[in-house]
Image (tube, rainbow, N blue to C red):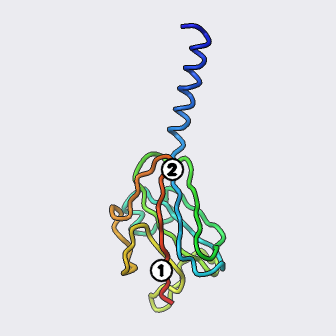
Amino acid sequence: MPIRKLVVASVMTLASTLGASAQTLTATVQDVRNAEGDLIIAVFDEAKSFKAMDVANAAALASVPAVKGQVSVTFHDLPLGTYAIAAIHDENSNSNLDTEKDIPTEGYGFGGMGQSGLPPEFTDAAVAVGTGATANVTLKYWK
């Protein structure tokens, strides 16, 4: 094979390999009621951690300033797989979902959450990750 064709083939192989390893997931959090505090967005790759909301074992985690309305965060370099998203609007920036008599006083949401506000099962919240994958989370506020 001529050297020019070999170089072009090598560059094309490298480019396709690099593209395959850079999987992204863009999480869009909707219905943020104000610009106070932060949004904490967790990406889970296993049902056990998702159900427990164990952010220490999240596959990816982001904390960004809250913006009224909608906020999008893109997670890069995730392995191919299935993920579920959870988000809280930490209005007082204390890194917790605050409650009063067991009722959340800050906004929260999950991918696949229904009107009840209860966390869905991992399989109901799951999104397959590949280049350009997206997930939407609508926040719920009780107070």
Left or right of residue 36: residue 102: left
Q: Distance between the residues labelled 2 and 1?
A: 26 Å
Q: Quadrant of residue 61?
A: bottom right
Badge 2 element: loop
Residue type, mark 1 in image: Lys
Residue 44 higher or lower than 102, as above or below: above
98 or 56: nearer the viewer: 98
Residue type, mark 2 in image: Gly
User: Measured from the top left, where is residue 5 in percent x and y?
Assistant: 57, 14
The residue that mark 1 highlights is 140
Badge 1 element: loop
Question: If you read the primary sequence from the N terminus, does the residue marked by circle 2 or circle 1 appear first?
Answer: 2
Q: Residue at x 52, y 40 (%)?
A: 21
Q: How many marks?
A: 2
The residue that mark 2 highlights is 132
Q: Which residue is drawn at 50% across and 38% down?
A: 20
Residue 60 higher or lower than 117, as above or below: above
Q: In which quarter of the image is residue 45?
A: bottom left
Q: Residue at x 33, y 61 (%)?
A: 123
